[in-house]
Image (spheres, rainbow, N blue to C red):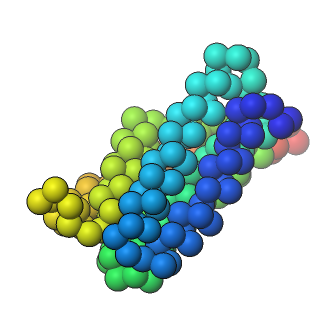
């Protein structure tokens, strides 16, 4: 179960406290280190999937851990931004609630033998969140760029994608559960 791909996924989870700690003791230097740590952790999201598919290391544990690691990293950093006053709480609340709802729906769907695959809006949401978090983590002006303003604009775009993809997941879940034969439960007929 703990193949290379899953170890990389676990590394992403373990990187989360480091990013949060660096943000907690904010300052221009520590924010740069936090940004590098976040970027490294985000790259592991691509690396674990690539290695798992290429080396035929796809496991049930990996299918569970990979999205969990993404949510732990991104939601933790967004919540830290609220504490620091770097992101509006209402945006973070909507994004975190969307993540909890989708995770819950996926868990129910798996239990019912239904696959809720990631769609293009969900993938766009993740990419936009990462691209929003990087400038928000940099926080301090550098190279004449107002990083926080850029990050907030990208966070608003990520919010829109989060709502669209969350709505798609809910609709997909509803449609797939309605298509099941009546009386079907946990993949068996009553």
Residue 103 in view in this figure:
no
Indicate whether 17 appears above or below 105.
Answer: below
Q: Is residue 174 left or right of residue 152?
A: right
* Viewer-closest of 27 and 42: 27
Indicate whether 96 appears above or below 38.
Answer: below
Q: Is residue 86 left or right of residue 148?
A: right
Indicate whether 120 appears above or below 104.
Answer: above
Q: Residue at x 35, y 82 (%)?
A: 85
Indicate whether 68 appears above or below 87.
Answer: above
Q: Residue at x 77, y 46 (%)?
A: 111
Q: How many marks?
A: 0
Residue 69 image offset from top left, x and y in percent: 63, 51
* Viewer-closest of 22 and 148: 22
Residue 156 image offset from top left, x and y in percent: 26, 61
Which residue is at the far left? 144
Residue 154 image offset from top left, x and y in percent: 26, 56
Q: Residue at x 48, y 66 (%)?
A: 77
Residue 188 image offset from top left, x and y in percent: 85, 36
Q: Is residue 29 left or right of residue 110?
A: left
Residue 11 in view in this figure:
yes
Say which quadrant the C terminus sits in: top right
* Viewer-closest of 167 and 32: 32
- The quarter holding residue 54 reads top right
Q: Residue at x 68, y 39 (%)?
A: 8
Which residue is at the far front? 29
Say which quadrant the N terminus sits in: top right
């Amino acid at each position: 179960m703990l193949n290379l791909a899953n170890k990389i996924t676990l590394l992403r989870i373990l990187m989360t406290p480091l990013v949060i700690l660096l943000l907690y003791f904010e300052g221009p230097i520590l924010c740069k280190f936090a940004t590098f740590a976040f970027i490294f952790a985000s790259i592991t999201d691509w690396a674990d999937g690539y290695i798992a598919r290429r080396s035929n290391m796809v496991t049930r544990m990996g299918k569970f851990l990979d999205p969990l690691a993404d949510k732990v990293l991104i939601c933790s950093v967004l919540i830290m931004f609220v504490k620091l006053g770097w992101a509006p709480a209402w945006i973070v609340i909507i994004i975190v609630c969307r993540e909890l709802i989708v995770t819950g729906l996926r868990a129910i769907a798996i239990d019912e033998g239904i696959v809720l695959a990631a769609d293009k809006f969900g993938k766009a949401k993740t990419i936009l969140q990462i691209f929003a978090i990087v400038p928000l983590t940099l926080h301090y002006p550098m190279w004449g760029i107002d990083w926080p303003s850029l990050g907030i604009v990208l966070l608003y775009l990520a919010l829109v994608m989060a709502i669209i993809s969350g709505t798609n997941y809910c609709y997909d879940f509803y449609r797939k559960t309605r298509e099941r034969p009546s009386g079907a439960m946990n993949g068996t007929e009553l």
